[in-house]
Amino acid sequence: MHRHTAHTDGGRPGAEPAKAAGAVSESAPGSGAEDYEAIQPLLRQAVTRGGLPGILAEVRDGDRQWFGTAGVADTRTGRKRSQQDRFRIGSITKTFVATVVLQLAAEGRLGLDDTAEQWLPGVVQGHHHDGAGVNIRMLLNHTSGIFNYTDDQEALNRHETHTPESLVRIAVSHPPNFTPGSGWAYSNTNYVLAGMLIERATGRTLAEQITERIARPLGLTGTYLPHGSDPTIHGPHSRHYTKLFRTDPGAPVHDATELDSSMFWAAGGMISTAGDLNRFFAALLGGRILAPDRQRDMFTTVPTRDWISDSAYGLGVSSVRLPCGETVWGMGGALFGSWSYAYGARDGEQMVTTNVNGDWSDGGWDDPIGIFTDLLQAKFGRRSGT
């Protein structure tokens, strides 16, 4: 999720629809919604104070789960958001992509010190870009210095559909931000290159690799990367509303549910559900997806700049230090009409995934990130006694 240009970037099997006011899974005997009394008012405030169409949150405490919503999935019909709702997850896609790369590294099919030039000859060249000086680790932790193609909106808008190669060409038409390895700057180009590299190393599409390696084994039935320029969200979903990231309260609202996400692809094109994201991150943080040495690689962080406050970045994951002093791990993502946060404890035992089906906040919060931070604080502040 790019902090300043955020536009650049069905539920669990057998789950019963949850009540809008919040519900605790029946798999948690003796638990009650009263344990989450601090969360539901924040969901309501996101709608009443923040002016958002709707919000949903799912909390995971080991085998115990809670789901709550406020507002609507569809402003025309008034339909409520549901636990089965699928939504565009933006840059949380990067965590899935990084996981596939690290699995390939564990299999010896590539190395994190391999260069972009080795795998994608001649692709990262021009305007002082040199793929021979950029390794895969730098792509995954945003220390490559490669220009962020989504910062060139004029070039993006020249075409409705984009190939990964065309996105990289936009990036290398600009000079790099810094010499590879000497700084940090969030760049969606890094993950487009990582996606291309996965396809080159495996001979399969990125979508197939994500499905076969992650979604299917974990039972993530609502999670997928759309094929090509498919603009639809398959399965149950909320409408996605955008003000095109304009900050004035009176900006017109547009319906961006149908969206060609090819310009985001490996950097932010995936679709998922709150339950699926909690399940994925619980397994990832809990060490059940990656080998121990690759796990260490993923969670070795570097400082960030001009991004989320009090954050650090690993390989496709980030840590955020909350006001209460607790540090949570996960990733956030924003795309037109959809903004999501999936963060939890380092061991994955506790997770919170939140999605708003609008990309603004009229209530004085610092974009929806302020809302998400308050929700995480409500959950994890208890761990620190605040």
Image (spheres, rainbow, N blue to C red):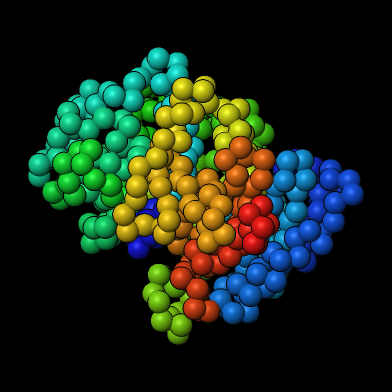
Nearest to the observer: residue 22 or residue 15: 22
Residue sitting at 56 percent across and 52 percent down?
A: 326
Left or right: where 67 falls relative to 310: right
Residue sitting at 67 percent across and 34 percent down?
A: 219
Instruction: Work out which residue is located at the far bottom of the displayed protein and give it.
Output: 250
Q: Is residue 158 visible?
A: no
- Vertical relation: 42 (above or below) 193: below
Left or right: where 224 falls relative to 79: left
Q: What x and y, as percent, mark residue 126? A: 11, 40
- Vertical relation: 346 (above or below) 214: below
Instruction: Work out which residue is located at the far front of the displayed protein and give it.
Output: 385
Q: What x and y, as percent, mark residue 25? A: 81, 49
- Vertical relation: 121 (above or below) 70: above
Residue sitting at 24 percent across and 58 percent down?
A: 152
Residue sitting at 32 percent across and 59 percent down?
A: 306
Q: What x and y, as percent, mark residue 83? A: 71, 54
Nearest to the observer: residue 385 or residue 82: 385
- Vertical relation: 108 (above or below) 223: above
Left or right: where 240 falls relative to 140: right
Quadrant position of residue 279: top right
Instruction: Work out which residue is located at the far right of the displayed protein and give it.
Output: 30
Nearest to the observer: residue 25 or residue 306: 306
Q: What x and y, as percent, mark residue 325? A: 54, 55
Q: Is residue 157 visible?
A: yes
Nearest to the observer: residue 185 or residue 100: 185
